[in-house]
Image (cartoon, rainbow, N blue to C red):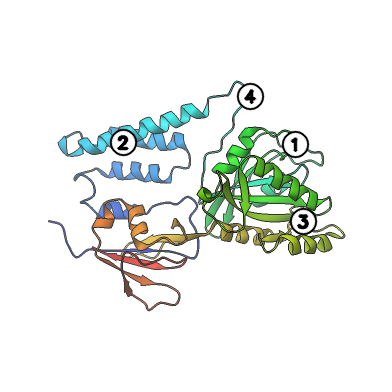
């Protein structure tokens, strides 16, 4: 017989997860969500699925779950859901191997808390930035157009991973359409300029190329539907090569011209100047909060929180845990900045970065 007095603790931490991982202890506790008598091997396979960072690993875990799950009437629905997920993911894999008649199409599967694309003209230092803040190893050279296809790496910010994608330069003439497709699919843009070249011309040239492709960089998010098909992308301007003589004065000019509309950060990838500022501003640009989970009687795990958009509520958090869970809990208690410890809140409470949530069902 189930115990109706169970309570579960979840929290939003001041740090983000590497991959939006879900705490699987809750699946062991909420036994009314899934069919009974699922073996421990199934729970482990499901955990592998939730933590998988790419599509092939997700398919492998789902197939393992389908093999392990007992076959009886009570699991018919769940087995059907697993088959549909496997079919959908395999279809996505097939699409990624399709090439257009005009040339190769590239795509980058999203990983981590968010995906951010490095954008800019030739020789601004995008590849060097990627190599300094991630473990990726792009080709870095003083001549232009060394980047000919996208390359991704994971940038660690506190306890989360943000995916950075380096792309070929946005040229004044022709740029492959797939470059702009990657930008449209991303969660944000890092627009890089070279302080020791002609950053004003670089910025305006890049803005014009993006606008022609229906991409509009913005400092604050807007409603895409209000502007004739334009896709708005949150953007941070990175002023690279700040270590060179005369760069500070140029940076001040750029900040005066663009600072009201965009965050503008001075940095040097080569010398490692202000890399932590780049990471912090990138996180702030994404406008997300960080959410972790805790099981009663165990320490808070601050290393694997959920990731939610700012403005999301406790109900949104419950739905992220499981679509059926939102119907089961009655109220929640909260710990966090500017709150009473254990203060009772309801489903419409707007979460903040750093909140600790305890659900009661």
Q: CA separation, marks 1 and 2?
A: 43 Å
Q: CA separation, marks 4 and 1?
A: 19 Å
Q: Judge the density around disc 2: few (<14), some (14-19), many (≥20) Cα neighbours within 10 Å.
A: some
**Of labels 3 and 1, the one closer to you:** 1
Residue name at image x 65 percent, y 44 percent: 211
Res 271 label: 3
Secondary element at tag 3:
loop
- Confirm or deny contact between disc 4 and disc 1 (CB under 8 A): no
- Confirm or deny contact between disc 2 and disc 4 (CB under 8 A): no
Residue lying farthest to the top in this orientation:
101
**Of labels 3 and 2, the one closer to you:** 2
Secondary element at tag 1:
loop
Q: Considering depth in this image, is 193 or 24 the residue closer to the camera?
A: 193
Res 146 label: 1
Q: CA separation, marks 3 and 1?
A: 20 Å
**Going from the N terminus, do you reach mark 3 or mark 4 first?**
4
Secondary element at tag 2:
helix
The residue pinned by badge 4 equals: 103
């Amino acid at each position: 017989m189930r115990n109706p007095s169970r309570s579960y603790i979840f929290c939003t931490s001041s740090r983000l997860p590497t991959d939006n991982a879900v705490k699987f202890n809750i699946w062991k506790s909420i036994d009314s969500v899934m069919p009974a008598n699922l073996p421990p091997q199934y729970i482990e396979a499901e955990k592998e699925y939730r933590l998988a960072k790419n599509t092939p690993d997700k398919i492998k875990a789902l197939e393992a779950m389908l093999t392990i799950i007992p076959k009886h009437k009570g699991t018919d629905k769940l087995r059907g859901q697993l088959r549909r997920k496997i079919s959908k993911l395999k279809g996505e894999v097939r699409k990624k191997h399709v090439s257009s008649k005009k040339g190769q199409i590239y795509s980058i599967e999203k990983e981590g808390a968010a995906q951010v694309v490095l954008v800019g003209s030739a020789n601004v230092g995008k590849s060097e930035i990627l190599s300094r803040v991630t473990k990726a190893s792009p080709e870095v050279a003083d001549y232009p157009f060394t980047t000919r296809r996208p390359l991704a790496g994971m940038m660690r910010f506190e306890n989360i991973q943000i995916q950075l994608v380096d792309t070929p330069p946005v040229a004044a003439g022709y740029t492959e359409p797939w470059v702009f497709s990657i930008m449209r699919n991303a969660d944000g843009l890092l627009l890089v300029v070279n302080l020791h070249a002609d950053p004003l011309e670089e910025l305006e040239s890049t803005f014009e190329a993006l606008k022609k492709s229906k991409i509009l960089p913005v400092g604050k998010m807007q409603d895409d539907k209000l502007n004739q098909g334009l896709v708005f992308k949150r953007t941070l301007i990175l002023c690279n090569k700040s270590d060179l003589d005369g760069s500070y004065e140029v940076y001040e000019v750029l900040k005066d011209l663009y600072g009201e509309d965009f965050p503008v950060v001075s940095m040097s990838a080569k010398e490692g100047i202000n890399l932590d500022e780049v990471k912090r501003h990138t996180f702030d640009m994404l406008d997300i909060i960080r959410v972790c989970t805790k099981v009663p009687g165990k320490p808070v795990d601050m290393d694997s929180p959920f990731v939610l958009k700012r403005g999301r509520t406790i109900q949104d958090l419950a739905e992220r845990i499981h679509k059926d869970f939102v119907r089961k809990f009655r109220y929640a208690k909260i710990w966090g900045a500017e709150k009473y410890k254990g203060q009772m809140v309801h489903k419409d409470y707007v979460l903040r970065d750093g909140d600790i949530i305890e659900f009661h069902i």
